[in-house]
Image: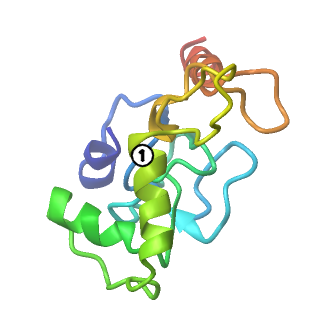
Amino acid sequence: MGDFVFHDNPHNCRGIVQVADPLRAAGQVNNRGVANTSWGCAGQRQLSGPWPWYSFAIPDDPIASCPGDNGFRQIADMVTGLHQPIPAQWWNAGATLDQIMKHLVGNPNLDPSYTFHLSRHCAYAVENMPGSTQTYMQAVRAAVVSLIA
């Protein structure tokens, strides 16, 4: 959806609602808790236009909120083919592995009574946004309803 809006100015668009966008631009997010030093792991696509837009990202989702200097971006380069500058921390294997683990394993809580182990990228339907009683997907639904009402 984001690529379509970015490359083609849709004439009948009422608004844009994105979740976990791998090309989310820094600062282009509606929920709290996401650092301005993070953006989508595949790079940045700044959305603008005459319509309202909403973008939701879990603060530590490595796909939508990857730290700008993290080596995980080099993996995204290989997967997507979208070239990015070499990240400043490309050599920091620990930080890169941390992002990989969040993507593959999810919550590292080892308490066996704690059953939530979804990947950080897959928790949008079950995790509440910071400072809210709504899950990300409930907020997405409310945004869509506001656009079509």
> 22 or 53: which is nearer to us?
22
Tell me the crowding category of disc 1: few under 14, some 14 to 19, or many 20 or more residues within 10 angstroms, Cα based. Answer: some
Q: Residue at x 49, y 33 (%)?
A: 15
Q: Residue at x 47, y 53 (%)?
A: 62
Q: Is residue 113 visible?
A: yes
Residue 62's place in the image compared with 43, above or below, is above
Question: Element at badge 1?
Answer: helix
**Three-letter residue code for mark 1:** His
How many numbered discs, if any? Answer: 1
The percent position of residue 85, horizontal first and vertical second, equals 32, 84
Residue 62's place in the image compared with 35, above or below, is above
The percent position of residue 23, horizontal first and vertical second, equals 38, 56
For mark 1, what is the residue? Answer: 103
Residue 106's place in the image compared with 3, above or below, is above
Q: How is the image coloured?
A: rainbow
> 135 or 106: which is nearer to us?
106
Q: Quadrant of residue 135?
A: top right
Determine whether, in the image, residue 32 is placed left or right of residue 104: right
Q: Residue at x 65, y 67 (%)?
A: 36
Which quadrant of the rendered structure holds the N terminus?
A: top left
The percent position of residue 117, horizontal first and vertical second, equals 54, 29
Q: Residue at x 38, y 51 (%)?
A: 22
Which quadrant of the rendered structure holds the C terminus?
A: top right
Residue 106's place in the image compared with 63, above or below, is above
